[in-house]
Amino acid sequence: MALYQFNFQPLAWYVTIGWIAVGLLLYYAVFEKKASVLEPQVLLPNIQSNETDIQPSVIVALHNPDTANVLINLAAPVAMQRNARLIGLSVVDVPRQIPIHEGMRFAHHKEAVLAKAKKLAKEFGVEMQTELVIAHHTSDGILSAAEKHNATALVIGWKGYTNARDRIFGEIADQIIRHAPCDLMVLKIGEKLEMRNCLLPTAGGPNAQLASTILNTVGKHFDMSVTAGYVVSPDSSNRNTQEEMNRIDSTLNNLDSSLKKEKKIIASNSVAGGIAKASRDFDLVVIGAAKEPFFRKILFGEIPEKVARYSPTSVLVVKKYEGVVKSFLKKILG
């Protein structure tokens, strides 16, 4: 129809282009400034708006003082292995109708958790830099800090459930999982706080490789015993079982030789259910996110998400950074 209209009356095209040009001019000259005031904002008091760190970092997002030690114990070895700074981050959440700089009045509420985190890191043998971020949305604050501090990995905790029907992990975690500008580690803290024996489900793929790499680092510090597991159907034949044992051996080959390693075949009709049930005998489950199609709303993949939700033990789901192009498209498309 547009081509027909041009052949019929070219003036219609010229008028349309003119209106678009006038609209863009008005938007960028007047309305963009008004709209930017209404958009959620982020304030990083210790960083200039145009600054970005050159030195890499590992950021751990802190909110609850009671779980700070678990997250730091996980993040500190990763920072040491990557030769990166360890940054403890806490966000002051300011209502959107309040100017962002007003959040400085509430900064003292986060001082306790940051002070405790710094002390815990020192006991671990790592110097931690603490950072306070003021934001209209907590997820925006964490993501902005990760970009400004050149983060190579981001560690966040998850309570294990969400009250929102349209969210998988909750509004904050969902946004961070989808848009994290670095490797991501999401820890659901279970009933056991110690990390002595770990279940590593066999999956394959780049995220599984990242899971093995992180486990090598964390496992050495806590003298972990690692069990590589694979879920099979209860009626699986001996031939199939041998193939699955070979996959387990392949996973174990990616682990450091200094770790105590075992094998486990999990018989279950449901992969996620089998892993969740088997996890009761372990302190920690480390699982790589499944590689999902681009337009699917699933964040980690169905199996890791169900394991994280229903396992009674701590579950660490890791997701490798997808790259600049895919991350940019996700931001544009939401």
Image: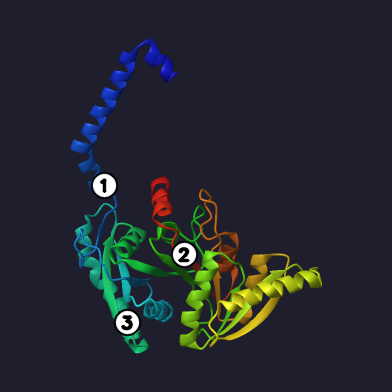
Q: CA distance from mark 2 to mark 1?
A: 33 Å
For residue 200, which quarter of the picture?
Answer: bottom right
Residue drawn 21% across the image and 65% down it: 47
Q: CA distance from mark 2 to mark 3?
A: 29 Å
The quarter of the rendered structure image containing the N terminus is top left
Residue 38, numbered circle: 1
Residue 4, numbered circle: none
Q: Is residue 304 above or below residue 242?
A: above
In the rendered image, residue 101, in percent from the top left (x then y), is placed at: 19, 59
Colour option used: rainbow
Per the image, the residue denoted by label 3 is 116
Q: Is residue 304 left or right of residue 18?
A: right
Of callouts 2 and 1, the N-terminal one: 1
Of callouts 2 and 3, the N-terminal one: 3
Residue drawn 66% across the image and 80% down it: 263
In the rendered image, residue 153, in percent from the top left (x then y), is placed at: 39, 69
Of callouts 1 and 3, the N-terminal one: 1
Proximity of marks 2 and 3: CB atoms separated by less than 8 Å: no
Residue drawn 31% across the image and 66% down it: 150
Q: Amino acid at mark 1?
A: Leu
Local secondary structure at mark 1: helix
- 23 or 209, which is in the foreground? 209
For residue 67, which quarter of the picture?
Answer: bottom left
Q: Amino acid at mark 2?
A: Lys
Local secondary structure at mark 2: loop
Closer to the camera: disc 2 or disc 3? 2
In the rendered image, residue 143, in percent from the top left (x then y), is placed at: 34, 61
Proximity of marks 2 and 1: CB atoms separated by less than 8 Å: no
Q: CA distance from mark 1 to mark 3?
A: 35 Å
Q: Is residue 91 visible?
A: yes
Residue drawn 29% across the image and 52% down it: 40
Residue 320, numbered circle: 2
